[in-house]
Every structure is written in C-alpha cells, then in structure tokens.
Amino acid sequence: MLKKAVGCAPRGKRALWVLNVQVGTQSISPLMWAIETGSLEAARGIIVDLLTIRADRDRYYYGMDIMFERHSNIINLLCLDAPALLPVLLDGLIWRSRIAENGQRRVNYYIKHLVVDEQGDFAKSVEWIRDHADPKIVVHPVISMVTDMVWSRVALRSFMAGKAWFIFTLLVFVSSQSLLGRLQLDETGNPPDTVRIALFVSRCFIYLCSLGQWLMLHLKSTVRDYRQGHLIRYGRCAIPEYLMDWQSLIS
C-alpha cells in the first residue's frame, strides 16, 4: 500500500509526501507516525524510499536532506523507539558504484547531518549512538567514518594540545617539588635566593595555571547546572548533575 501511495508522486515531491501531511492546522509526519505506532515495516519502507537515489534529465533526487531537516533528531528517535531501523537508515547513507575498477568500487558516504546540525554546531548523533550502546551499530561503516573523521580532523589536535599542557604542568610540578630544592645548597644547607625565587615562581604557576584552570571549569559547570536545574538530590542536598560523570568527579 505504501508503494501505491507514493508511486504516483512526482520525484521532486516524493519525499514531502512521506514526511509532511497537512491535516487542517496540524502537520503530521507519516514516518514518525509509523514509528510511534509500531508499524516498523511501513517505517522501513519510508526510510528506504527516502534514501533511494532517483534521477531525471535535470537533476538527481535524494531525500536525505529533507528527512534530516524535518526530523533532525531521527537518530535519537530510532535509538529509543525503533533500534531495528538504525541499520536501514545508516545503509541508506552509503552509495556504492556497480562498476568495479581494479577490484575496487567507488563508495560515497553522506554523513553531513551526522557531523553538524542545522545551526552548524557539532551534531549529537555520535552521542546518541554511544548512549544506545549497541556494538553492531558502533562498528557500522557510516559511524566508523564519522568518528574517524571527527577524531583525525578535529579532536586529535585539541586532545594532543591538552595532554601536552598536562605533561608540561606535571614537569613543572615535579621540578618545583623534588628537583630545584636539591640542586644547590649553601653552607647552612638551605637553597640560595635564586633557587627560592624559582621555587616560588614554579609553585605560583602550578596554583594559578593548573589548579586555577580546574577551579574555573568546575565553577562554570556548577553554575550552569544550577541555572538549568540539572541537579541530583540526595535528601536535602542538591549536587550538580555533571558530577555524576566519573571523569568530572575525580578531576
């Protein structure tokens, strides 16, 4: 019935027919309606139809952009209500050529909406997949492509810069606590003034640039959670929600 319903739709409006139906003053999405009512076969057919590439003499038609514009959180919705449809959607984001050259085929990955959202910010698709905790989805070629791209082009540089700063502050801390005070001692067994000044500067650097950095981070996170009401209550005590993350807690 689904094929008959959309079979007569023009190629340019085919995606709109399965994503937006106007009923009076309400706009209903047949795709979301099928997912919410448990009609997974109908939802599967809609997703496959949307992610099928069609063409005429003028242009190609691919419903990916319209689908993510209409349902920007579709990855999260599928993770919660229809996880069996996640592989169907992810498979539809891959195009494989039918022609093989030297034993290889050209493959296109359409992952724009998995990397950035409509506002140009980093999309939450990877976060939703992580929370879903399905190893079969995590190793899907599309998710692997997204995570590898984000790591190699964005996260790696900031990660290495953060670790380099941590190692530098660690070396300064070790030097000020263990090395400088034992390098040179005067006749009374105390370090000279130059060493004392170096110790003072090193410890001020540690307290301000290392400890101060963590204090500012925790202060901002605490104020943000209290303003947004993201609190975990234990009796009369309200704890900021970000402290439920073990990494934030031990830092």
Image (tube, rainbow, N blue to C red):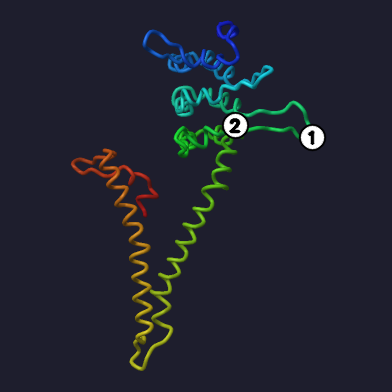
146 lies left or right of 105? left
Residue at 31% of width from left, 49% of height from top? 220
Residue 129 position within the rendered picture, expressed as x and y whole percent measured from the top left: 49, 34
Residue at 33% of width from left, 65% of height from top? 208
| 95 over 155 or under it: above or below | above
Q: Name the disc covering residue 110, or none.
A: 2
Mark 1 closeness class: few <14, some 14–19, many ≥20 residues within 10 Å? few
**C-alpha span from label 2 to label 1:** 23 Å
* Numbered disc 1: secondary structure: loop
Towards the viewer: 160 or 190: 160
14 lies left or right of 72? right
Q: Name the disc covering residue 103, or none.
A: 1
Q: What type is the residue that disc 2 sits on?
A: Tyr
| 237 over 175 or under it: above or below | above
198 lies left or right of 55? left
Q: Which quadrant of the structure image shows residue 191?
A: bottom left
Going from the N terminus, do you reach mark 2 or mark 1 first? 1
Q: Nearer the viewer, mark 2 or mark 1?
A: 2
Residue 44 position within the rendered picture, expressed as x and y whole percent measured from the top left: 55, 17
Residue 77 position within the rendered picture, expressed as x and y whole percent measured from the top left: 45, 25
* Numbered disc 2: secondary structure: loop
Q: Which quadrant of the structure image shows residue 61?
A: top right
Q: Name the disc covering residue 59, or none.
A: none
Residue at 38% of width from left, 48% of height from top? 246
